[in-house]
Amino acid sequence: MSIIITKAVIPAAGRGTRLLPATKETPKEMLPIFSENIQRELTVKPILQVIFEQMYDFGVREYCFIVGKGKSSLIDHFTIDKTELAYLNEKGKQSLFLELSNIQHKLTSSSLVFINQPEPRGFGDAVLKARPYITDTFLVQAGDTLILSKNNQHMNRLWNVHKKYDNAATIMVQEVDDPRQFGIVLGNEEEKGVISVDKVIEKSESPPSKIAITALYLFSPSIFNALELTSEGSGGEVQLTDGIQKMIDSGLNVMAVELKKNEYWLDIGNPESYWSALNRSRNNILNSKTIIK
């Protein structure tokens, strides 16, 4: 089945206050995690670059990054710098030259738009900012969340379920021990690993489910109408989960796809989860049979 998802919205406007002082001048989406370079060597990359490369490999070529104040280094990172390439080539740093050439090729063959979210009005508001650029089914992924799977199999499953059931929204989820810090879904299993969603709930102190939303979604443009009708919640924020619930209430089909046991959800929202993400990303690379250690 050919992949036809070519557009993605990546909200990256969060302040990262739980990771201060590291995020005082550095956006949390630019914090490094372990990855591999083009020569299959262990390296470090900003988590947002890993997300971009993963989506590129999936077939995405049009990106809407939602940014805010203090994100200039993020924009600079995704701007082609031929001077740096020339410097690396002149100094004979071929490994680094090849790596930078690879990412710059991906940038050159993609279209990137940086959309300003002037105020931190929530994840739903961030997604709504991309409406002028979206006319068909599109991916949404938080800029501080990464899922690791072999050959992007989780994204392929998300798309396959979305198309099979003609969904308006398809959500990637995972069962967790403590769901209080995540949005969760409620519903019935349609097939193994696939849930027909009846209800989505934003972070709750007493969540009625342990099936957590991993901040990776496929949406039809109908999400924009739902978000426009969504009222602000606490703190004046528009929650994406509330928009999804409006889709469900209006009779649109919403389903969730569960991660498999050998797939890993990395979140860098706080020091503990960032520490876990560093360990998991490193081990995932080193456990690969072909990686050069």
Image: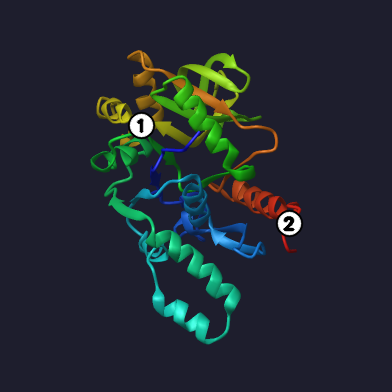
In the image, 290 versus 267, the foreground residue is: 290
In the image, 70 versus 135, the foreground residue is: 135
The reply, left or right, for residue 194 in relation to residue 3 is right
Give coordinates of residue 45: x percent, y percent.
55, 61
User: Label 2, on which residue?
Assistant: 290
Is residue 225 positioned above or below 5 on the image? above
Identify the element where label 1 is drawn.
helix
Determine crowd level at label 2: few under 14, some 14-19, many 20+ residues with C-alpha closer than 10 A: few
Q: Residue furthest bottom?
A: 90
The answer to which quarter of the image holds residue 35 is: bottom right
Give coordinates of residue 285: x percent, y percent.
69, 54
Is residue 253 positioned above or below 162 on the image? above
Give amino acid for label 1: Ser
**At x 41% / y 28%, what residue is drawn?**
241
In the image, 105 versus 274, the foreground residue is: 105
Q: Nearer the viewer, mark 1 or mark 2?
A: 2
The answer to which quarter of the image holds residue 111 is: bottom left
Determine crowd level at label 1: few under 14, some 14-19, many 20+ residues with C-alpha closer than 10 A: few
User: Label 1, on which residue?
Assistant: 234
The answer to which quarter of the image holds residue 71 is: bottom left
